[in-house]
Amino acid sequence: MQILDCDVVVAGGGPAGTFAAVKAAEAGAHVILVDKAYVGKSGCGTFGAGSFKAYIKEEDSYDLWYGKAVEEGFFINDQDWLRQHFETIGDRVRDLERYGVVFEKNPDGTYNRIEGQGSSDVRPIKTLMFHGPQFMEVMRKACEKAGVKIVDRVMCVSLVHDKKNPKAIRGVLGFHGVSGEPYLFRAKAVVLTTGAQAYKSHYADLHMVTGDSHVMGLQAGAALCNYEFNCHQLTHAGFATHGMNISQGLGARFVNALGEDFTAKYDPEYASHGNLWRISASMAMEVHFGRGPLYFDYSSYTPKDWELFARTLPLMFRSYVQAGYVTEDGVCRKGKLEWVSALIGNVGFGGGLWIDLQGRTTLEGLYAAGDASYGPTSGVEGFCAYAMPAASTTGTVAGQSAAAYAASVGDVALDEQEINAAAWAMTEPLRHPAGCDPVHVVLAVQEALFPYDVYILRTEKKMQQALARIQEIKADDVPRLRAVDPHGLRFALEARNMVLCAEAMLTAALYRKESRGSHLRLDYPEIDNENWLKWIMIEKGADNGLVLSTRDIPIDRYPLRPTCRRELHASIAAARKLGENI
């Protein structure tokens, strides 16, 4: 077993993890950054889609951005965190430029920004644009320059507690994905930043984003929050794509089988510029009412639009060229492409580990940031303060706080019995070479979660059926997961994590008996601000079960509060106004 000692270990090398590592190192901590792939080449950040939606105080209205974040967060945001995010996001943009990230700029040196998701002529929310995968390549170099020790291709699996204090975390255990060698990182503080649970979905090739931090934290005793809320991405029906912010910002629009831009019927202000859950819900409605299949129409793009598209979304542009949709010089050959909604769990916003304003979880010495956290800035889908920008601000806070805490901790003492038990459990699938194929589990989870009446237009009956199937998989298949080598072991543990996160998501969704943003229940169609301005907390219970509780949102001391005690969910209200029976 490789044993490495440090002040702060950061698990996960995406935007949040690299920011946490750099900021902890700048604060004087000895930092190790661990990633199960290769820092700079894996995870959501690599497919960051060229869009960085940051409030620029010299150009933007604070009240507009803050108000839109809370409006689309459906008052589930932590508004203290939101204020902190907007106060510091400009510093993070300057950090990125200092590290070497290139943003699109105008000839006069100002930022060239477009109106992407959730922007309208009345309320413009503009996004910065950068050049695709370059972002994470730069962040790796920033870590190296700061003196961070990077350990690639080690999957973190279990947290390790302080020998004398079972409520404190003092390390993390994992294994090398090629050699299989176990790794123990002894640390005074741990920052979890391995990202969200994407359920290996049909979007942006997020097949390694499997809720590793969520499961590690939950099993160690930390609390999850907001797990009922999910990101509904929008993607090509035939292959995984990304870059919706820029695609929408350049003028592509959604149409149904009749050729109608149906989004305007459900969301008149934003139409095809709407945010993800609104368009996803309207897509489900259109299919439900028999007006599918649905399309994303790029026909209005000019060669200049395609040039900007290619510069900011090089991977997606290459896919379109290879598919024959556009030529290398920007001549559109096929503009109308079949498009679908895709559940990608809590990527960008949605559930994760609860954190306070210092990035601390409910366990001492354990911090979280980015999609490993519960998205305190974004709430349900506060797209003004989410994804990579929020990863940069939460990562900075978690890294700085972890470094300060580590400086106050003495020698680290671990429990050898706990380490040995965790190492034995981690390698369990290697002892079942004839057991259950992880592919079977992955497909079974997707079959349970991906129907639109489970994750978009929800009902108690359908979610109960899905939960029963997930719990069956958990009981019958997870204990028998098989692996024959370290690569297979990673895949088996990712499949297990998908099951555990699916159970948490469905349990929380059944618990919240109202509709709110992406959580749209046909059996509870109203937003209920009287009874459900609450965060749902999930903790580990007896026999690996889940214990749910609620924490009141301190809405009375926040600057923005809902004006209605109850109101019909906007998507259902729009459908009924159109005469649809739903």
Image (cartoon, rainbow, N blue to C red):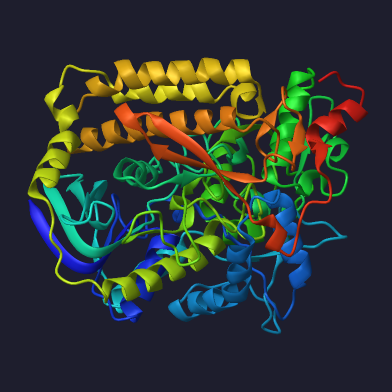
Q: Nearer the viewer, residue 121 or 572?
A: 572
Residue 468 seen: yes
- Identify whether 497 is placed above or below 347: above
Viewer-closest of 173 and 15: 173
Position of residue 544 measured from the top left corner of the image (x, y, whole percent): 32, 30
Q: Where is 68 relative to 205, above or below?
A: below
User: Is 473 or 79 nearer to us in this picture?
Assistant: 79
Residue 551 as seen in the image, left or right of residue 395: right
Residue drawn at 21 percent across, 63 percent down:
187
Please identify the quarter of the rendering in which residue 483 is found.
top left
Whether residue 336 is visible to the viewer of this picture, yes or no, is no
Residue 19: x and y, percent? 41, 68
Q: Residue at x 34, y 80 (%)?
A: 27
Q: How many marks?
A: 0
* 442, above or below 61, in the image: above
In depth, the one of 522 and 14 nearer the eye is 522
On screen, residue 478 versus residue 246, left or right, reads left
What residue do we see at 57% from left, 66% from top?
Answer: 130
The quarter of the rendered structure image containing the C terminus is top right
Q: Where is residue 292 in the image (x, y as percent from the top left)?
A: 75, 22
